[in-house]
Image (cartoon, rainbow, N blue to C red):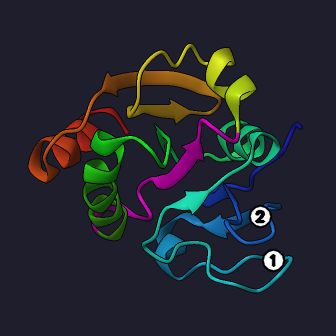
């Protein structure tokens, strides 16, 4: 999808209805979806399906931080509160999303996910950074700030 964004505006994909909306760059934290009217950022990671993932990664001008995980994975469960804390702290500078690799094996395969948790950052559809394994909050937050 080719979206034209006005000067001073940023394209963001709504975490609720998954439509792309334009919001003032200086009002990202208070921005609301043009379609459903809900807040664009609420400080919580968004669980995404494969199609929703593609829409967020390809259409958002805000970096997307992805946690590829599975519910049976102990390190993934250990990483979950760290990821949640980072979303509260760093949104709206980045969108935080979770992809359950058991529910989305084709997406995991397409992105070469060989171990979980795998954390990746995408900017305008391109993966720019990746780490594997659980990490502590300070290291994870610093990693996101360095690459987002």
In the rendered structure, find residue 34 and report the number of the disc placed on it. 1
Q: Position of residue 72 (x, y in %)?
A: 44, 44
**Mark 2 to mark 1 CA distance (whole Å):** 6 Å
Q: Position of residue 117 (x, y in %)?
A: 38, 34
72 inside magenta stretch = no
Left or right position of 130 against 109: left
Q: Residues within 10 Å of mark 1 (few under 14, many from 20)?
A: some
Which structural element holds mark 1? loop
Q: Which image quadrant: the C terminus?
A: top left
Residue at horizontal 65%, vertical 17%?
Answer: 109
Q: Which one is nearer the viewer's eye here, 16 or 39? A: 16
Pointer 2 and pointer 1: residues touching (CB < 8 Å)?
yes
Count of all numbered marks drawn on residues in the image: 2
Q: Position of residue 95 (x, y in %)?
A: 50, 55
Q: For mark 2, what is the residue? A: 21
Q: What is the span of residues highlighted in magenta in the rendered image?
A: 89-103
Residue at horizontal 48%, vertical 49%?
Answer: 71
């Amino acid at each position: 999808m080719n979206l034209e964004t006005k000067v001073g505006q940023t394209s963001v994909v709504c975490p609720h209805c998954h439509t792309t909306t334009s919001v003032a760059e200086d009002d990202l934290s208070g921005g609301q979806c043009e379609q459903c009217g809900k807040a664009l950022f609420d400080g919580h990671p968004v669980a995404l399906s494969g199609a929703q993932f593609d829409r967020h990664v390809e259409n958002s001008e805000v970096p997307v931080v992805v946690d590829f995980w599975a519910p049976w994975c102990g390190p993934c469960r250990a990483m979950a509160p760290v990821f949640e804390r980072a979303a509260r702290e760093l949104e709206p500078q980045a969108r935080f999303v979770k992809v359950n690799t058991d529910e989305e094996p084709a997406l995991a395969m397409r992105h070469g996910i060989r171990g979980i948790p795998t954390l990746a950052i995408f900017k305008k559809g391109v993966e720019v950074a990746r780490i594997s394994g659980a990490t502590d909050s300070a290291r994870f937050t610093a990693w996101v700030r360095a690459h987002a």
